[in-house]
Image (spheres, rainbow, N blue to C red):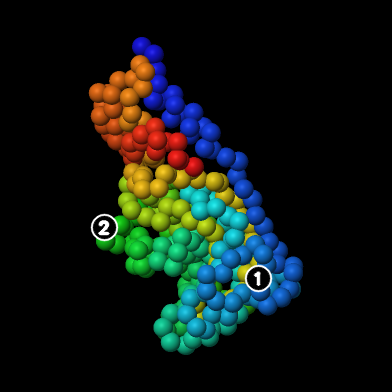
Amino acid sequence: GPMNPRILILAAVFAAASAAPLSFSDDFTVSGPRPSDALELSSGAFPVSGGKLSVRADRGGAFAVFREAPESETLDCTFRATIVERLNPAGYATAGIMVYQDAANHWRLQFAEGPDKKRYFEMGETLAGVWQAHSSGPDKLRSAEILSSTWEYGREYAMKIVLSTNGIYGEVSEAEGGKIVARARYFWDSAHAVSMGRPGVTANGFTAQFAAARVTAENSPTAPAGIAVENGKSGRCAILSADLPGGDSPRIPVLSKAARGAGFGVTLLSCDELSRAK
């Protein structure tokens, strides 16, 4: 029989929603006490000098994100990073790059040093204010390719985060030679996670320098206000819930069950809600 019109309409909507990737870069060539126009500060100070974005985070966490980057579920973010000195001898000191929604919801790929002076790389998620939410408990994520090693003060490293609709990957390599010294991969599956955000940098307890920022991100279609989007292991889909000429409303539960059975999260949208999607 003919294709259900609600499928055709939604296919057209999602085809129109896809957009070309957006690219951003900054070599921090304009010196001054404030960061370049590309960055938006959440907290802390980030002076720029000699191709370096510096941060001296001696009073709590410092965060800065790319001003023009959209909150995206698909992005590739790389920075060069160097740890200059430790400022706070107590507790843990950290610095690195991030995918950021807000202070309570973000991913960090970072240098870390504990009170015992042990130095290592780590990748972690803060979800609803809980650090390392991905590693245990109800929101634990499936992982792969976990590798970590020590790092040296004054040595430059290349840091990369790749965010996709399936999960997140982080990698650190030596700037000279390219040897990979840390990496981690986590999968969303059907778990609750910080699966979208904006690229940026962060530090707490270190003086750090960042350079050669490169970001590629895709505009992610956003749901209408008040609509909770259901996630699934295979992805997400929407089904039009309103009657259409030639439509078959009784088939909506059948379509929904089939999609969920294939691992997709299903969101039901009315014509009015669909018209408000961006």
Q: Position of residue 149 (x, y in %)?
A: 48, 69
Whether residue 48 is situated above or below residue 253 in the rendered picture: below
| Front position in the image: 181 or 222 | 222
- Residue wearing tag 2: 138
| Front position in the image: 78 or 40 | 40
- Is 234 placed left or right of 207 in the picture? left
**Amino acid on which disc 1 is placed:** Pro
| Front position in the image: 106 or 123 | 106
- Residue wearing tag 1: 35
Q: How many marks?
A: 2
Residue pictured at 40% horizontal, 66% vertical: 104
Q: Where is residue 40 in the image (x, y as percent from the top left)?
A: 58, 66
- Mark 2 or 1: the one toward you: 1
Q: Split into 4 quadrants, where in the image is the N terminus?
A: top left
Image quarter for residue 90? bottom left
**Amino acid on which disc 2 is placed:** Pro
Residue pictured at 34% horizontal, 67% vertical: 130
Tell me if I can see residue 188 in this picture: yes
Few, some or many residues within 10 Å of mark 1 (<14, 14–19, 20+): many
